[in-house]
Amino acid sequence: MKGLTTEDMEKIEEGIRQKYTKVAISPEGNFQYSTGEAGLKGQNYNPEILKKLPGDILASYCGVGNPFSLGTIDEGDTVLDIGCGAGVDTLIAATMVGPKGRVVGIDLISEMLEHARENLRKTSLNNVSFQEVSAEGLPFQDASFDAVISNGVFNLIPDKVKALKEVLRVLRPLGRFMIADQVLTVKPPEDTRSMVENWAR
Amino acid sequence: MLNEAGFIDYELVADTGFNSSPVTKGVLFRARKPKDVQRRRGMSSNPMDRYDEFFSMVYQPGALDVKTKHLIALGASLGAGCRP
């Protein structure tokens, strides 16, 4: 992103890492909105699909919206979940695509991925993988996904245009990008230091 | 920003009501990758492709949202006596 130094980027990453290492243990108390099952219900996730996942997986949900409300995920689809966190959306997508489909969840925080893999082990799904990867440099071939989902993550990515270009590259023609996120309702702070310090808040 | 990255079909769909702070709000966006990225970037001289490109550009969200544009088009078609 323009105007940010390497040091700024490192501070941003450290801020994100600090917050989400705590969230990896439990989202409760780390957000100003409902998390866990209350959050999923409040965002109208399909109750029939939620029933298929154990309650303690659902408890780790901390998304800001329901990306599945934006379009279809079909049986056999390949889906990428950017910033998968504890993997709740990833596992929901895996339930939707079925055994013929494939879902990849990526995140930068190893503690979150550890939680996601632990959640995966509580299911019988075998069409999911998790990888520690940056959204700004996806290690996937061009046109390899039918859908890309993301929930509350793009606002944290320093170079958003670079990450969006990567999404476009890995999507198949007519592939869907379905995203829930936070946007500022006020002007961004002019002072870079304040912006960097408040990035993950 | 989606436009800057090369997406053509994109739409801000709704607020989610799940806000992280008093100065942010939760929102839902959807976008679709064009059928042929090269063609959409103006590489084709085929008239049908160019018309398709024009059609897609007209239906981008702008002063009017996509749904309103489609409803206006439907109204115009019915008014002109078009048959399905």
Image (spheres, rainbow, N blue to C red):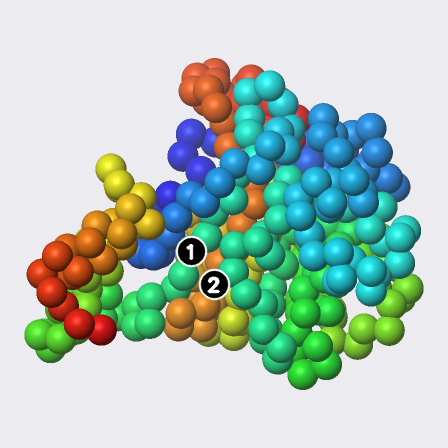
Q: Which quadrant would the C terminus of chain A be assigned to in this image?
A: top right
User: Is residue A140 visible to the viewer in this orientation of the structure?
Assistant: no
Between B52 and B34, the residue placed more toward the observer is B52
x and y percentages locating residue B22 in the rendered image: 60, 19
Q: Secondary structure at mark 1?
A: strand
- The three-letter amino acid code for the residue at tag 2 is Arg
Quarter of the image for residue A149 reads bottom right
In the current view of this chain or complex, which residue is farthest to the bottom?
A100
Label 2 lies in what chain?
Answer: A
Residue at 82% across, 64% down = A52
- The three-letter amino acid code for the residue at tag 1 is Ala
How many discs appear? 2
Q: Which mark is residue B31?
A: 1
Residue A167's place in the image compared with B19, above or below, is below
**Image marks 2 and 1: residues in contact by CB distance under 8 Å:** yes
Q: Residues within 10 Å of mark 2 (few under 14, many from 20)?
A: many
Q: State left or right for residue A186 relative to residue A35.
A: left
Q: Which mark is residue A176?
A: 2
Residue at 20% across, 54% down = B75
Q: State left or right for residue A19 relative to residue A188.
A: right
Residue at 90% across, 51% down = A56
User: Is residue A149 visible to the viewer in this orientation of the structure?
Assistant: yes
Label 1 lies in what chain?
Answer: B
x and y percentages locating residue A115 in the rendered image: 84, 53
Report whether mark 2 lies on the same chain as mark 1.
Answer: no
